[in-house]
Amino acid sequence: MSKDNFDFLLASVTKEITHKSTHARPISPLERLAITIRYLASGNSQFSLAMSYRVSPSSVCLIIRETLAAIIKILQRRYLPNPSQETWTASEARYRLLWNFPHAVGAIDGKHVRVKLPPASGSLYYNYKGFYSIVLLAISNADFQFQAVDIGAFGSESDAGILGKSTMGQLLETGQFGIPRPKPVSAMGPTLPHVILGDDAFPLRNHLMKPFKGNFLSRENSIFNYRLSRARMTVENSFGILAARWRIFHSVIEADVDLAKSIIMASILLHNFLTSKSDFNNISPDRVENGAIIEGSWRQMVQGDRGMVNIPQQGSNNYSRNSSQVRDAFVNYFMTDEGKVRWQDVHVSAGR
């Protein structure tokens, strides 16, 4: 991060991480924050940081834990508040403007985050991929910031149960997440619900759109898939930039579960803070030029990393008739003069 942003962050958390002087050499708030940011950004072990900063390993462990807690306390209210109807409405306006997907309010993805075997946990954290993990579910906005997260499901949770059993999934399913009610997409357009955009790992719901499956799709369905996948790049960019910036996610997090959760939350808050300041540290996101998707530099930076792994398909492909009708309504709207974009036919034809 830039020096200005580091200084701003330091001023924000100094009160929380200042310790009273003792007979030992005091470790300043600047050193405490520097150690913690270095830990997240480098992925180096706590022992190597202790050697670099000439601090005892036990002190480094305590410094990281306390500083992460301070970052979460100070940044969460501003950079990851509980989403409200106003949050979703603002997000929809950006998806409409930047990604040509009206009534999209966010894009969802999930990752298994590798952790070391927690003591006395048996197989609770052992997932289908054969390693220990906790699950991170996240919804991004149109500007690559996370606007809702759910951290901590057991890695062993059944594929179908990860979203459904999460607090996030239950709030979505029961309509208690503050997402605005359905309304006309424009003055003359159809009435459509506000939706989250997912990939094939997620179930099709009235509030959650996913692509059509199959190799021989109609032109209309292929255009819908293109429009959804294009807009859903936002959450792929969010996770990609997160992992490229914080190399702690490039391998197993060597920490107990509580500390691992703090690492994930603090990293997300710092991601939102820095993204809001347009501080990308030369990490470029995927972008679109004349309808074509240009890959961002983060893809090369995280290629081959194994610290975060996609969650698998969430249960069966069964869905209600109503959910199918909602998706079809978006399909039809994207084929109208008002709803289409000029390049969609070209890019769908090129990909068929």
Image (tube, rainbow, N blue to C red):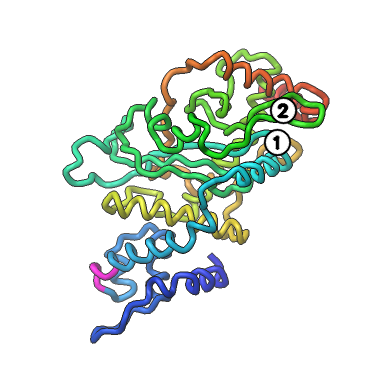
Per the picture, the main secondary structure of the magenta-coloured stretch is: helix
Per the rendering, the mark at residue 49 is none
CA distance separating discs 1 and 2: 7 Å
Q: Which type of secondary structure does the marked residue at label 2 adopt?
A: helix
Residue type at mark 1 is Ala
Foreground pick, 144 / 349: 144
Foreground pick, 282 / 115: 115
Residue that lies at the very extreme toward the left in this rendered image: 120
Answer above or below: position of 276 versus 128: below
Tell me residue 166's x, y (percent).
40, 35
Answer above or below: position of 23 versus 247: below
Q: Which residue is mark 1?
A: 292
Residue type at mark 2 is His
Label 1 packing within 10 angstroms: few (<14), some (14-19), many (20+): few
Comes first in the chain, label 1 or label 2: 1
Q: Which type of secondary structure does the marked residue at label 1 adopt?
A: strand
The stretch of residues the image draws in magenta is 56-60
Q: Residues at badges 1 and 2 in contact (C-beta under 8 Å)?
A: yes
Compared across the picture, whether 209 is left or right of 10 comes to: right
Q: Is residue 300 visible?
A: no
Q: Which residue is mark 2?
A: 347
Q: Please give the name of the residue rendered at 38% of the width and 66% of the height, measured from the top-left corner.
A: 67
Tell me residue 286's x, y (percent).
62, 44
- Please check the rendered image and state whether residue 58 is part of the magenta-colored stretch, yes or no: yes
